Image: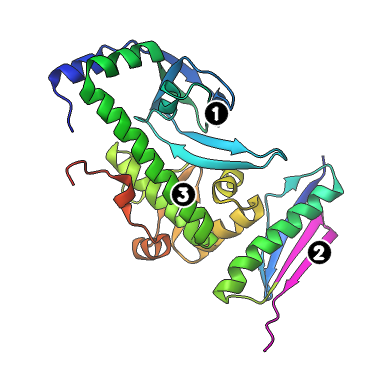
Amino acid sequence: MPRFHFHIVEDGRVITDEQGQEFTERDAVRREAVETGASIARDAFIRGSASQVIVDVRKGDELFLKVSIFLTVEG
Amino acid sequence: MALDDQDVQAVRSLPVMVKHYQPGQAIVRDGDRPAECCLISKGFCVRSKTTSNGRRQILSIHIPGEIPDLQSLHLNVLDHDLITLTECTLGFISHVSLREITRRRPNVAEIFWRDTLIEAAMFRDWIVNVGQRPAPSRLAHIIVELRERLKVIGQVQGARFEMPLTQEQIGEAMGITPVHANRIVKQLRDDNVLEFHRGSVRVIDEQKLLELADFDGLYLHQRPSL
């Protein structure tokens, strides 16, 4: 089973995922990345500690997918 | 509410069947109809429930001295899973003998009732924690609560105590993904609040931990005389 690493970038600050997780389906990786990003963004946006959260998913060394979440407040 | 000598004698003479469990083993499962309750003598357990699409929520962490499935004495069908986290030594006491002792010794019945009421108070607190606190506070709160309970049974040595949850299980307790849990664990270490190491926790900054945890231990009702 391939192993995926979910690295987090909050306003440029990188938090690496050394452990990684195993997934067999592409969709499950995507779901995990979106949910992780949304959940981290919720905390970071409310606290005001970041306004951009990126989940950079690697399969081995190569980029597998990337989820970007931005906070925009207008008015 | 206190036990007299005869109550204590009656509790001591309850027949107990001792069994050993490996980590990650189900003791009782959702839908089971148990005929006995289990007293944790050694090790840690969790209660959890899993949604139809396979997402697990950990509901509570249990430590030695507790009877996590006492409810099965009066509610026939179990509505959640009880699973070992570590190697466990469990003492099984039959419902027949528990029912008999509660009828014969009303003080014991009151203590059991009180126990399940405190459990309900802890579940209320768990709901507030998971629903209202940001993730770092959520984890700090769970850790401070666990420490308060471990203190009662003398299992806190200085700043260190056992917390045998994996990152995935921490996520399941807090309702977040393992990667988010990993991020929180790292943040608490980088902020010099606490540090996880091989199934235990070491508190680095007590003041910071308490501020983050937003903890008022009243709901544990650890002083019956209040």
Q: Which residues, given as a range, are shown in magenta?
A: A53-75
Q: Confirm or deny contact between disc 2 and disc 1 (CB under 8 A).
A: no
> At label 3, which amino acid type do we have?
Trp
Q: Kindly identify the residue that appears in the image at 26 percent across and 29 percent down.
A: B110
x, y percent for residue A64: 85, 57
Q: Kindly identify the residue that appears in the image at 54 percent across and 56 percent down.
A: B185
- Asked whether residue B165 is in view, the answer is no
x, y percent for residue B72: 45, 24
Chain ID for label 2?
A: A
Q: Which residue is mark 3?
A: B126
Which of pointers 1 and 3 indicates the residue nearer the eye? 3
Q: Which residue is mark 1?
A: B23
Marks 2/1 same chain: no
Residue B103 as seen in the image, left or right of residue B29: left
For the residues marked 2 and 3, what is the alpha-carbon distance in whole angstroms?
33 Å
Chain ID for label 3?
A: B
For the residues marked 1 and 3, what is the alpha-carbon distance in whole angstroms?
24 Å
Q: Kindly identify the residue that appears in the image at 33 percent across and 10 percent down.
A: B15
Q: Is residue B94 above or below residue A14?
A: above
Q: Kindly identify the residue that appears in the image at 38 percent across and 62 percent down.
A: B205
Instruction: Bin the neighbour count of mark 2 within 10 Å (Cα to Cα): few under 14, some 14-19, many 20 and up.
Output: some
Marks 1/3 same chain: yes
Asked where in the image residue B192 lies, by quadrant, the reply is bottom left
Colour scheme shown? rainbow
Which of pointers 2 and 3 indicates the residue nearer the eye? 3
